[in-house]
Image (cartoon, rainbow, N blue to C red):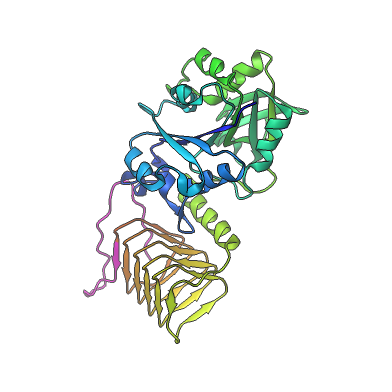
């Protein structure tokens, strides 16, 4: 058995995270100041998977710029352009020349599994099923692909069923032998015009191939929606060790686990951790509450923020109080100086604002 390759999918449009994803890849939205895609690459390398193909679409240049050749992760990365987002099984078809005859792990680039996947890769290598799928018991399984089990075997997969027959949903990580390539060639597009990986795995089940489940005991977060991103940010900030590479003035109060990245400055402010202040970010006369991640080159002055993610080059001045928010890159949020006090907004398509 040769080495297991990795296939990371980073081609989707990110419609559930608009307007952030109008101008950037959803896989590069940072969790605790690290793009979510990087966690996927690190999980693969940690599991011994170092040959990785990344399937890319419209945001290919941005992803290529962020990841490079993969050497910083200890991997060798190649890029596989997908003509259009025509489904996960179509992505596998597109990657066929890259995969050759290798076993592979398919990892959706916006999924987050805090415990990693080393144990699953070992299970796959020991038991040698045709496919091994990760499952997690979830409320509202009708929003996902749902699996039905009989003992150790998967007997049926249904994509977003109206009446789910189990609460076990497909997590965005799959392990395949090359035989899956026969299945993806055999299936027809679904009613939404996509080649569904669930249909390909069902084809394997129907043709007597072995499909094993691995039920994830810990957390799994699909970071496709804002609330899930904030939850993921909370989980990761809780796990990170404290680092103080930036500078805080003597009149600051840093309470709990606070990470100051290189070149950051905190002046006359209170930060209550877990929180992270990114490289070359300035926090002046402000309060930063728990579970907040300020990315690099952010300015926060005379403001209060908690349980939020702020992307790079954004400036927030004189604003109280921001919470449960995801604020994009190159944004200016400031207090209006005019009376009567009024909110003056310039918002992109698909924005959502809550004002007191």
* In front of the other: 18 or 235: 235
- In screen coordinates, is 115 left or right of 160? right
The boundaries of the magenta stretch are 332-356
Farthest bottom residue in view: 251
> Which residue is at 62% across, 35% downward?
169
Q: Disc count in the image?
A: 0
Asked if residue 132 is positioned above or below residue 64 in the image, the reply reads above
Q: Is residue 1 visible?
A: yes
Farthest left residue in view: 338
Q: Is residue 168 visible?
A: no
- Image location (x, y in percent) of residue 84: 36, 27
Q: On the rendered image, what quadrant is the C terminus found in?
A: bottom left
Asked if residue 111 is positioned above or below residue 201 in the image, the reply reads below
- Image location (x, y in percent) of residue 335: 29, 71
- Image location (x, y in percent) of residue 160: 55, 30
> Which residue is at 69% across, 21% downward?
210
* In front of the other: 126 or 270: 126
Magenta stretch: dominant secondary structure: loop
> Which residue is at 46% across, 46% downward?
71
Asked if residue 120 is positioned above or below residue 112 in the image, the reply reads above
> Is residue 85 found inside the magenta-colored segment of the image?
no
**Quadrant hosting residue 104:** top right
Q: On the rendered image, what quadrant is the N terminus found in?
A: top right
- Image location (x, y in percent) of residue 120: 67, 38
């Amino acid at each position: 058995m040769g080495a297991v390759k990795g296939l990371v999918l980073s081609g989707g449009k990110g419609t559930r995270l608009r307007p952030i994803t109008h101008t950037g890849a959803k896989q590069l939205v940072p969790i605790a100041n690290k793009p979510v895609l990087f966690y996927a690459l690190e999980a693969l390398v940690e599991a011994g998977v170092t040959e990785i193909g990344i399937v890319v679409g419209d945001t290919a240049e941005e992803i290529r710029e962020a990841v490079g050749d993969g050497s910083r992760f200890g991997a060798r990365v190649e890029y596989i352009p997908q003509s259009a987002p025509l489904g996960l099984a179509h992505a596998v078809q597109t990657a066929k020349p890259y995969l050759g005859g290798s076993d592979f792990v398919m990892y959706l680039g916006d999924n987050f599994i805090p415990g990693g996947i080393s144990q699953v890769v070992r299970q796959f290598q020991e038991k040698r099923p045709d496919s091994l799928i990760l499952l997690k018991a979830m409320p509202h399984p009708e929003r996902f692909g749902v699996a039905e089990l009989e003992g150790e075997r998967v007997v049926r997969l249904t994509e977003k069923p109206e009446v789910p027959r189990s609460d076990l949903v497909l997590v965005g990580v799959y392990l395949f032998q090359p035989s899956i390539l026969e299945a993806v060639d055999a299936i027809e597009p679904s009613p939404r015009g996509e080649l569904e990986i669930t249909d390909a795995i069902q084809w394997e089940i129907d043709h007597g191939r072995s499909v094993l489940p691995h039920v994830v005991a810990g957390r799994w977060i699909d970071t496709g929606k804002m609330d899930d991103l904030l939850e993921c940010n909370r989980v990761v900030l809780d796990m990170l060790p404290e680092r103080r590479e930036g500078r805080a003035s003597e009149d600051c109060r840093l309470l709990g686990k606070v990470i100051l990245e290189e070149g950051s400055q905190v002046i006359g402010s209170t930060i209550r951790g877990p929180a992270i202040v990114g490289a070359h970010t300035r926090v002046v006369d402000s309060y930063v509450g728990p579970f907040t991640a300020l990315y690099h080159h952010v300015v926060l002055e005379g403001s209060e923020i908690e349980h939020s993610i702020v992307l790079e080059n954004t400036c927030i001045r004189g604003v109280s109080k921001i919470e449960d928010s995801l604020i994009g890159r190159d944004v200016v949020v400031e207090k209006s100086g005019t009376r009567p006090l009024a909110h003056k907004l310039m918002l992109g398509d698909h924005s959502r604002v809550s004002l007191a």
